[in-house]
Image (cartoon, grey):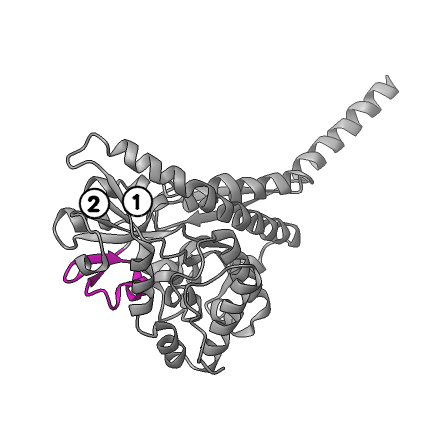
Amino acid sequence: MKQLLGLVLAGAVAVPAAVSAQETLPLTIASSHPTAIPWVGMMQTHFQARTDEILAETGNYEIEWQEAYGGQLYRANATLSSVEDGITDIGWVFSLLEGGQLPLSQVSSYTPFSTNNPPVQLQVMWDLLQNNEAFAEEWSQYNLVVLGLTGTDNYDIYTAQPITGISDLDGMKISAPGALANWLRGTGANAVDGSLTSYYTDIQTGVSEGVLSLALGVLPARIYEVAPFVTRVNMGVAFSGAIAINRDVWDGLPEEVQNALTEAGAYYTEAHGQDLLDRHEFAMNQIVELGATQDPPVTIFDLPEEERAAWVGGLPDIAGDWAAANGPEAAAFLAAYMDGLRAAGEEPLRDWDAGVSN
C-alpha cells in the first residue's frame, strides 16, 4: 500500500512538470498577397512547417501561428511599415514596392537580362546581406530581422493584343511593379504602376493593356484571361523581398526559437529558389492549357534573340543612373552584385557595372 501511494504521489508530481515543460508562443504571420501565390503559400508549407518540425525535436516550445495572409492586415503598399510597427510579428516585405526605403534592394530591378536563375540570385543576395554592411543596415534600420528571401521567376510580357517585336510596344500602357517599370524604358511603352493583386482589373478596365510579369504570378491570378498573348522575352529574375520579423518581437523570443526561425528561413529561401526554377515551365504550360478554350486563346510567342539584344542594348544606363542617385554605397553594391552573379557562372547580357566607379 505504501509502495502504491508512493507511485501515485510520484505521478502527481511528474505529470504537471511534463505539461508545463512546453511553452506556447503566439506569433502572427501575414502577407499582402494570398497563399495561392507560390512564395506566399510556401510561407505556410515550408517556413512555418519547418519551424514547427525543428521545435518539435526538443518539445520545449510550440508556436501558435495566427495567420493573416491575403491582405487581412496590410496591403502591398504597406508591407515594410506593417512589420516595422508590429502590426504583424512576421510578414512578407515586398521590397519591389519599397524603393524609397530599401534602395539597395532594388539592384536587380536596374540590371535586367543579367540572370534567369532564381537560386543563384537569391544566394548572391543572401551572401550580400551577410557581408555587405550597407545592405544589412538597410533592413535592420526598420526594426527588422530578415529570416528568408524571396525572388521571382522569369519576367515576360502578357498583353491583350499580340506583339511580335519591340516596336509594337510603342505607345502601349503596360503594368509593372515598382522599379521594374525601368525595364520598359526605350521601348516606347507607358509604364503603369501595379502588382499581381491589381493587374487583372487594370487590364479588364483599360487602365493598362498588358503586364510585365511572371508565370508563377500570372497563373494563380488568372491574368492570362485578360492578357492571353504571351511574349517570352526572358528578361531575367528579380529580388522581390523577404520574410522578416519585428525586432522587438525577435528580442523577446527564446534563443531556441530564434535559431529555429533562422534555420527555417534558410530552408525556405533555398526551397523557394528551386521551386521558382522548376515550376516556371510548368506554369507556362498550365497557362496555355487553361487558356486554350477562351476567346482569344492563350498563345506564346518567343521574342527573337536579335530583338532581345536590341531591347537590352536600347535601354538607357539605368544601373548607372540608379548608382549615381544612391551614392557610393550603391555603386559598390552594384559591382558586388554583378561580380557575385558572374562568380556563380551567370553570363549577363549586359555588364551593368561597367564604367560605374565605386
Q: Amino acid at mark 1?
A: Val
Question: Circle 2 — which element?
Answer: loop
Type of the residue with mark 2? Ala
Q: Position of residue 17 (x, y in %)?
A: 71, 37
Give, as a single range, the part of the protein colored magenta.
Answer: 170-194
Residue reaching furthest to the left: 206
Tag on residue 218?
Answer: 1
Question: Which residue ends up furthest to the front in the rendered image?
Answer: 306
Q: Residue at left 34%, top 40%? A: 284
For this view, does 150 lie left or right of residue 170? right
Vertically, is 6 above or below 136?
Answer: above
Residue at 40%, 43% in the rendered image: 280
The N terminus: image quadrant = top right
Marks 2 and 1 close (CB-CB < 8 Å):
yes
Task: Residue 320: give x, y in percent of width and height.
Answer: 38, 77
Q: Quadrant of residue 110?
A: bottom left
Whether residue 344 is situated above or below residue 37 in the rendered picture: below
Percent position (x, y) of residue 301?
27, 46
Residue on which the image places disc 2: 227
196 up-or-down from 144: above or below? above
